[in-house]
Image (spheres, grey):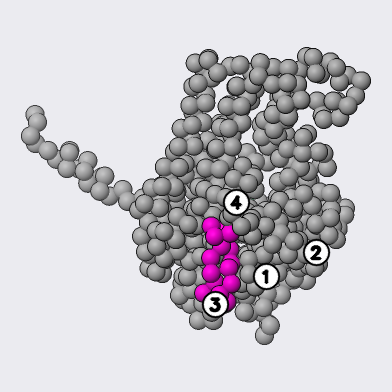
Amino acid sequence: MPARTGAAYLQGLRERNTEVWLGHERIRDVTAHPALHRGARSVAHLYDMQHDPTLCDEMTYISPTSGERVGLSFLTPRSLDDLQRRSRMMLHWARYSGGMLGRSPDYLNVNITAAAAAAAFYAQNDARFADNIRNYYTYIRENDLCLTHTLVNPQANRALTAAGHPSAEIAARIVHETDAGLVIRGARILATLGPLADEIAVFPSTVLRAAADTAPFAFAFAIPCDTPGLRFLCRESFDYGHAPFDHPLGARFEEMDAVVIFDDVLVPWERVFLKGDAALCNAAYAATNAVVHMMHQVVVKDIAKAEFLLGVACLVVDALGATEFPHVHEKLAECIINLELMKACLRAGEADAALDQWGVMCPHRPPLDVARNVFPKMYPRMVEILQLLSSSSLMMTPPQSAFDSPVHDDIEQYFVVAKLAARDRVKLFRLAWDIACSAFGGRQVLYERFFFGDPVRMASALYGIYDKEPLMERVRQFLAREDES
Ligand SMILES: Cc1cc2nc3c(=O)[nH]c(=O)nc-3n(C[C@H](O)[C@H](O)[C@H](O)COP(=O)(O)OP(=O)(O)OC[C@H]3O[C@@H](n4cnc5c(N)ncnc54)[C@H](O)[C@@H]3O)c2cc1C
């Protein structure tokens, strides 16, 4: 099947019987429900971009098996050109939402693509698992399926987690093995896009102690989101049904986060990729380089998001007639620096890319790792800058209905600013508000802080992979110099 259209994606969701809960309500059709349908429509738009005649060549490539055009984020990069084609494609998707749809499908497409290319890694656990991951990759590529994922056990007792033990009664675990597959019981967090996805990848990330008692918690698999026994428990939706004028982001890009419950879910053997080996599970993302390919997607998203925030901040300053103040320049320069640093990280990651042991052209990890460590600090600061630059204008934001009310004349008269009429001013600052003040905006900040993992452990990972020895040796040599007294 060729790359899907938005209509095909939405039809696919309608045909699924995924168990999605929002408060007391079981949502039967996520494409029609007020809390989720506009987010679904935005994801559908991404799929439609694959069929836009002006973008099609950049968004898709020819499948090696079917000869059809399939989504380019499924391309296994073998050259620098492939990597750069992929980042151009991902930038088109990221710019559509100003980076606010963090879980555009490319995020997990590049994950599974890298995992399949490194199938031999999974064979170390069981030869069948290598075939399983290869077949799964081909299946999602040829059907252009949309994935969510869940890697983390719910916070229950951090002391246990820090010692490498999951909370045994809460964390998802293998409770039986049958001829048909594994039976999973327990919970995982936090499947972003879960209610709007076709499939869920349940991969390892929590660092497990390699011991017999952690074996039931060590696994990787992927199953359809409507597998019996699987439930998605949503947080409150940040799409309140208001017009895009009022909630320019929340009304479009609600991608939803859900806790995933496994109520004795049967995972067929052909969908199991790892089982019972904590050491392999702990190593999986790094050893297959899947994490680096995900960082590649993430830094592209960061660029689109930094561009968007800088663009909004510049419009705000321009609207208020504040373009000449040095402190304003300083704040905008900080946003420019953030954007240019993300672009430099992407470029450096691609420029120093090399073929890895799996024959995949893999971006150079350190610059991308720098990006994923620093953007969680940059993003909240850019939001703060937007607040500082906008100040009370973030509150001079009456809903659109005020323009059709008895106070209409007041608004037209008193809400003008240096460069904008009242309506355009309110429209702009409602966007700034949806970034800097709304629940949608607050969730974006939290997302950037945590979605790629705990910042402390991400920093430890960077410290761990970084080649420090040459630097230490240079200093040793400096200390040993006897040419100066
Ligand atoms: C908006 C949002 C969307 C998300 N979407 C997804 C998603 O789609 N899929 C997904 O899988 N996850 C998702 N996450 C979850 C994300 O991966 C986690 O929040 C992140 O990994 C941190 O885990 P935690 O929240 O359980 O915090 P913890 O891991 O509990 O970390 C909290 C503190 O405990 C310490 N700690 C805990 N365990 C250890 C340990 N073993 N070693 C060292 N220190 C430890 C940490 O240093 C940290 O200071 C999302 C999170 C957010 C906020």
Mark 2 CB in 8 Å range of ligand 1?
Answer: no
N-terminal-most mark, 2 or 3: 2
Residue 68 inside the magenta-drawn segment: yes
Q: Is residue 429 visible?
A: yes
Q: Which mark is residue 90?
A: none
Mark 3: which amino acid?
Thr
Label of residue 93 in the image:
4
Separation (CA) of disc 1 from disc 3: 23 Å
Find the magenta span and give its range.
56-71
Q: Residue furthest right?
A: 406
Q: In the image shown, does 178 or 389 lie closer to the viewer?
A: 389
Q: Depth check: 15 or 259 in front?
A: 15
| Residue at 75% from the left image edge and 21% from the top image edge | 422
Few, some or many C-alpha atoms within 10 Å of disc 3 (few <14, some 14-19, many ≥20)?
few
Give the residue number, with chain letter if any, for mark 3: 65
Counting from the top left corner in percent of width and height, residue 477 is at 17, 42
Q: Are marks 4 and 3 in contact (CB under 8 Å)?
A: no
Q: Which residue is mark 2?
A: 14
Report the residue at 8% width, 29% height from top.
Answer: 485
Three-letter amino acid code at the position of disc 4:
Trp
Badge 2 marks a residue whose secondary structure is helix
Looking at numbered disc 1 in the image, what kind of residue is underneath it?
A: Ile
